[in-house]
Image (cartoon, coloured by chain):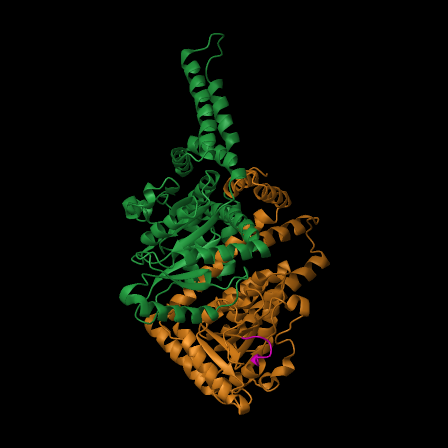
Chain colours: A orange, B green
């Protein structure tokens, strides 16, 4: 990418007449470019010093789809990488209404009291439409947002979950380099967003409300299997009995699942974000999880596997896009699907034809 | 593929001197080719007549990796396709020792008594090593194997599950064209083999034994979610009480899962293949499932989606193989993985570099 950019800069200066006297416009450009270079180094330095304004600007660069911004973002990320990796990354999911914002507000404030620096990000693939439905309204976390040691950022927008995921992963690195040692990543259950957040966090927390007895109905496939903890929220007042019963049911359900590679047995906890109860035991759980994972090696192994996953995922998406977004192949695919439906050809023979077509495209 | 073959035939004849007199070797070749053509049409005709020897030969062609066989297989499949699609395809899984062979023997014999023609195939990705561990020993189904209306075939061998899956899918078409109206596809739980069999069948049956109370422990992730029925086998003699308890536990567990797109509520049944009990109710279940699916449209929709799945799956595998099996890319991938591990580069930037490398390979 950086190479391409250099080429375009070269051809630009090449298109201007060579002259012994420096053209005033060029001089201006050179100054601007020197200033930019200085600014980038400065931005990285300020970010590493923990300056939240710098962090915000850096994330804006990472989220930008503009080519020149991407290059700057890449330089920033490379500078930030050696200083990152030191936090714990916690994914938090739960259906709308479960009290995610209130929980994060309480949990984040508690962590800051414990001397932590807390960053809150969000993955919301619907945000390109709704302009950031989660965390968009920062006033929902009115105490946390005032804390010096808290950094809150709404979901990046993007046309695909993959794009949002990439921006969020890069934002995590920047937050960590800025000294935030707990990164909370919130998601609502839109499409595959939980799986995406699970693939970029160390610990995955499912928030639930105590309901009318059939607690497990309506939970999306695979969510329970991903959870390291299920926290039953709003366990206060008249809800306490129902919350305790829900805890029993979830505990029984968790036992039905195969044991996790992490060696961790998922736990169920009760909390009231409103009454500020149970928050400390959630943090104790997470610390216990981290200790186990650092002892048995799973913690670092998992991060390494996540890196590999995102590398391969990005390559695979690209390879598929080249095929499926090609207008000729789109058309051919429709033709073959019709032929399969009419029993004219098997799926495998059709695939062979399509592959041959694709390879002879140019 | 057929085009390539024609090209190579053309270049072959082009390399020989043109002559007015037909060279005796060429004449022999022409006769052999005419004979082959006749034989293929004959093979298809015999297959459509329900000749089991022809079916066996056709499957051997489909399983062959030889290029000339692949071409013949393709012609056979195209001829068979309009006559297929009329059976019900039933996937059967369960750990070794659960009594799959005995169950299939009883179930198959029962179906034949009901006037059905029953084909039994297997998907066993380990069979390239063990030379067909499931169904390899046909004597395990000594009654079924003698039936005129039964056809039993061990698993295709292959270096990849994808290869075995393709051969099995094609064999299903041939069995159906030969008039087999129930196709049973057995698998042991090696790697992703259950998912593979699930993706090529209409109904998925999990065989279980009543155990020591914790029935759900040790079941692989996702298997229960795929099952349309769980049949507790060997529910006879001293086992009956445990089997009934297991039935209760599975019924409770099944309720915890989200409802299926098919609209079908998975059922638990007891059976004793040895005592020939419960076999009829398993068949009743499957008929009920088929009736529901044909009424609500899921049955055909699912087959259509399976066709699309295998088409896309085959294309995607090919696209990935071109990248990941390229020796240059293999090497570059290792380098980038090391760089990511050492915090020199993000997974996304590394992916960009690899993609650029790949696109400039030739």
Viewer-side residue, B319 vs B248: B248
Residue visible at 44% across and 24% down in the picture: B36
Q: How far across and down, in percent of the image, does residue B41 sit?
A: 48, 27
Q: How far across and down, in percent of the image, does residue A190 sit?
A: 58, 67
Is the C terminus of chain A in the top left, top right, bottom left or bottom right quadrant? top right
Horizontal side of residue A168 vs B331, given as left or right: right
Residue visible at 43% across and 47% down in the picture: B165
Is the N terminus of chain A in the top left, top right, bottom left or bottom right quadrant? bottom right
The quarter of the displayed image where residue A361 is located: top right
Q: How would you classify the magenta stretch by its main secondary structure? A: loop
Furthest residue toward top: B21
Q: How far across and down, in percent of the image, does residue A357 sit?
A: 57, 38
The answer to whether any part of residue B217 appears in the image is no
Viewer-side residue, A200 vs B340: A200
Q: Is residue B77 above or below residue B110?
A: above
Q: Is residue A114 above or below residue A25?
A: below
Furthest residue toward right: A24
Q: Is residue B43 above or below residue A83?
A: above
Horizontal side of residue A198 vs A154, given as left or right: left
Which region is colored magenta? A94-100
């Amino acid at each position: 990418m950086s190479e391409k950019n250099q080429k375009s800069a070269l051809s630009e200066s090449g298109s201007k007449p060579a002259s012994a006297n420096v053209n005033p416009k060029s001089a201006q450009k050179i100054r601007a470019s020197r200033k930019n270079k200085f600014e980038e180094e400065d931005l990285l330095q300020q970010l590493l010093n923990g300056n939240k304004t710098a962090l915000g600007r850096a994330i804006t660069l990472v989220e930008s789809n503009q080519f020149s911004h991407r290059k700057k973002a890449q330089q920033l990320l490379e500078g930030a990488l050696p200083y990152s990796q030191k936090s714990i990354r916690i994914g938090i999911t739960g259906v709308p209404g479960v009290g995610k914002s209130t929980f994060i507000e309480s949990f984040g404030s508690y962590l800051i009291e414990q001397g932590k620096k807390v960053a809150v990000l969000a993955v919301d693939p619907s945000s390109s439409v709704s302009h950031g439905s989660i965390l968009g309204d920062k006033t929902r976390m009115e105490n946390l947002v005032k804390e010096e040691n808290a950094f809150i950022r709404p979901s990046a927008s993007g046309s695909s979950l993959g794009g949002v995921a990439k921006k969020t992963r890069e934002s995590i690195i920047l937050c960590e380099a800025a000294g935030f040692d707990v990164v909370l990543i919130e998601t609502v259950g839109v499409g595959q967003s939980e799986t995406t957040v699970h693939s970029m966090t160390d610990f995955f927390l499912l928030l639930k409300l105590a309901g009318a007895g059939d607690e497990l109905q309506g939970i999306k496939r695979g969510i329970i299997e991903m959870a390291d903890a299920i926290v039953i929220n709003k366990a206060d007042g008249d809800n306490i009995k129902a919350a305790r019963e829900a805890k029993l049911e979830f505990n029984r359900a968790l036992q039905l699942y195969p044991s996790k590679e992490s060696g961790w047995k998922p736990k169920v906890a009760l909390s009231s974000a409103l009454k500020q109860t149970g928050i400390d035991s959630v943090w104790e759980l997470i610390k216990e999880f981290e200790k186990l994972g650092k002892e048995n090696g799973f913690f670092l192994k998992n991060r390494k596997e996540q890196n590999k996953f995102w590398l391969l995922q990005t390559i695979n998406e690209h390879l598929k896009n080249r095929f499926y977004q090609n207008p000729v192949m789109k058309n051919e695919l429709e033709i073959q699907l019709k032929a399969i439906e009419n029993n004219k050809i098997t799926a495998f023979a059709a695939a062979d034809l399509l592959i041959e077509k694709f390879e002879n495209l140019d």
